[in-house]
């Protein structure tokens, strides 16, 4: 009987010891993992690069770093900052080449943002209802202004569009009621040649298109 009890006790001790060992190994593995966030900005590795996938911080001013864990930050994913109403300013590094769909949608207090010169694409509704932005310059590498990109940007007054843009999709500037100037990098003929969806500027204000050779009215 004593032998049986001793065996049970020994088995129990071994189980406890194994559990402690496995737990320690698990904690060790976690400590070896690289960090996934910095200053509230959450990243995801994509190949040899990083993408911003969300923001969990509380600061109103956000500075996205050029690199994370020794690798370049090259994109801002879909919905990354969506509905973050506390944000007033975002600094995007020159390493970023793409901004995803709805990336800043609903950031109603966002008023200060500068797009990096190497940016190649801006997703649909990327700045939907960013109602505090007054001015935006679209970099020269962007060739397409997607659907609803600046829809509902009710304080947007000045937009700079590069000569390389070939299409502007529906509702791109829908309800931009404060719009005064579209500064276009090419000629009036180039502006007219851009493929524009029927409702690209629906319900926007009267504005002037300032081309390199002349100015046009809405």
Image (cartoon, rainbow, N blue to C red):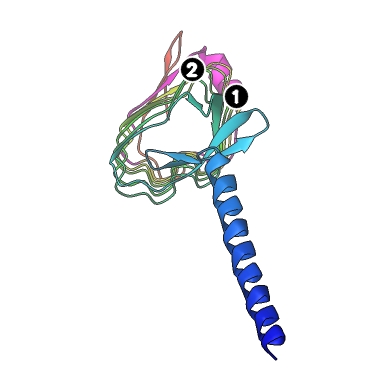
Q: Which residues are magenta?
A: 177-201
Q: Is residue 97 above or below residue 84?
A: above
Residue 70 screen position, x and y as percent: 54, 24
Residue 6 screen position, x and y as percent: 66, 80
Is residue 196 on the magenta stretch? yes
- Nearer the observer, 175 or 62: 62
Q: Residue at x 52, y 12 (%)?
A: 187
Residue 50 screen position, x and y as percent: 57, 32
Q: Residue at x 48, y 19 (%)?
A: 94
Mark 2 or mark 1, which is nearer the start of the sequence?
A: 2
Residue 143 badge: 1
Query: From where the camera sits, is residue 199 visible?
Result: no
Q: Residue furthest bottom?
A: 1
Residue 118 screen position, x and y as percent: 53, 18
Q: Residue furthest top?
A: 213
Q: Is residue 65 left or right of residue 100?
A: left
- Nearer the observer, 91 or 4: 4
Pointer 2: what residue?
A: 117
Q: Is residue 31 above or below residue 113?
A: below
């Amino acid at each position: 009987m004593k032998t049986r009890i001793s065996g049970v006790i020994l088995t129990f001790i071994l189980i406890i010891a194994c559990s402690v060992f496995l737990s320690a190994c698990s904690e060790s593995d976690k400590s070896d993992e690289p960090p996934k966030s910095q200053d509230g900005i959450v990243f995801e590795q994509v190949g040899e690069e990083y993408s911003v996938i969300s923001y969990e911080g509380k600061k109103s001013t956000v500075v996205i770093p050029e690199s994370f864990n020794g690798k370049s930050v090259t994109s801002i994913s879909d919905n990354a900052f969506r509905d973050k109403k506390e944000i007033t300013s975002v600094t995007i590094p020159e390493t970023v080449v793409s901004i995803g769909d709805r990336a800043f949608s609903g950031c109603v207090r966002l008023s200060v943002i500068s797009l990096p010169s190497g940016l190649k694409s801006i997703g649909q509704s990327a700045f939907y209802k960013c109602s505090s932005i007054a001015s935006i310059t679209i970099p020269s590498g962007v060739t397409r202004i997607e659907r609803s990109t600046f829809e509902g940007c009710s304080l947007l007054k000045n937009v700079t569009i590069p000569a390389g843009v070939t299409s502007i999709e529906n509702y791109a500037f829908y309800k931009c009621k404060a719009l005064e100037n579209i500064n276009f990098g090419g000629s009036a003929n180039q502006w007219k040649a851009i493929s524009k969806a029927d409702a690209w500027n629906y319900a926007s204000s009267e504005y002037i298109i300032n081309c390199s050779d002349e100015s046009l009215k809405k």
